[in-house]
Image (cartoon, rainbow, N blue to C red):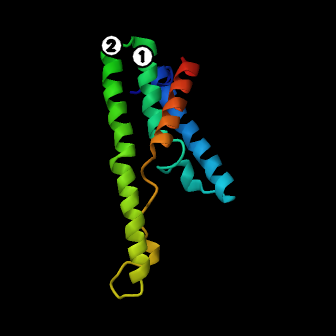
Amino acid sequence: MIDLRELLSNRLLIAAVCSWASAQVIKTIINFALTRSFSPERLIGSGGMPSSHSAFVTALVSSAGIHYGLGSAEFAISFVMAFIVMYDAVGVRRETGKQAELLNEIMAVFQDYEGFPSAEDKLKELVGHTPLQVLFGAILGIVIAFIIG
């Protein structure tokens, strides 16, 4: 059986989850300020400023460095995973969003043709991040890791 006290005392996990949640809340506030409308999807969705994926993994790697040292296996493993996640966010996932945007434009042109997807079947465009969004997510993760300790 899972010991909830042990799970809740895991500072690495707490820092990572708090960083993800903070990024999602910040992302929702920024979206509200820009659009003047509340979008609940921003609380759990991907894409946008700051990158919650980057905040999550950077808090994890920072906490691993704080608790186990920079020469530890925990730090090395989390560092490699953080690198992969952030590289993917700026690379593959960002390109996927660009392709979805283009495909949605094509679908809008051909939506009146029978058998072609309708405008309601739009592909999700906000899946990746700009390097700046990843950077701010990483900074947020580091800050929260040091706050939580």
Q: Is residue 87 visible?
A: yes
Reading the image, the residue beneath label 1 is 65
At a point 31% along the width and 28% down the height, the residue shown is 80
At a point 60% along the width and 43% down the height, the residue shown is 25
Q: Is mark 2 on a helix, strand or loop?
A: loop
At a point 61% along the width and 52% down the height, the residue shown is 31
Where 59 falls versus 127 (above or below)?
A: above
Measuring from the top left, give residue 73's x and y in whole percent: 30, 16
Quarter of the figure with the C terminus: top right
> Do residues under tags 1 and 2 come within 8 Å of each other at their CB atoms?
yes
Where 127 falls versus 21 (above or below)?
A: below
Reading the image, the residue beneath label 2 is 72
Where 40 falls versus 54 (above or below)?
A: below
- Report, in whole angstroms, how far the alpha carbon at label 1 lies from the one at label 2: 8 Å
Mark number displayed over residue 136: none
Q: What element carries label 1?
A: helix
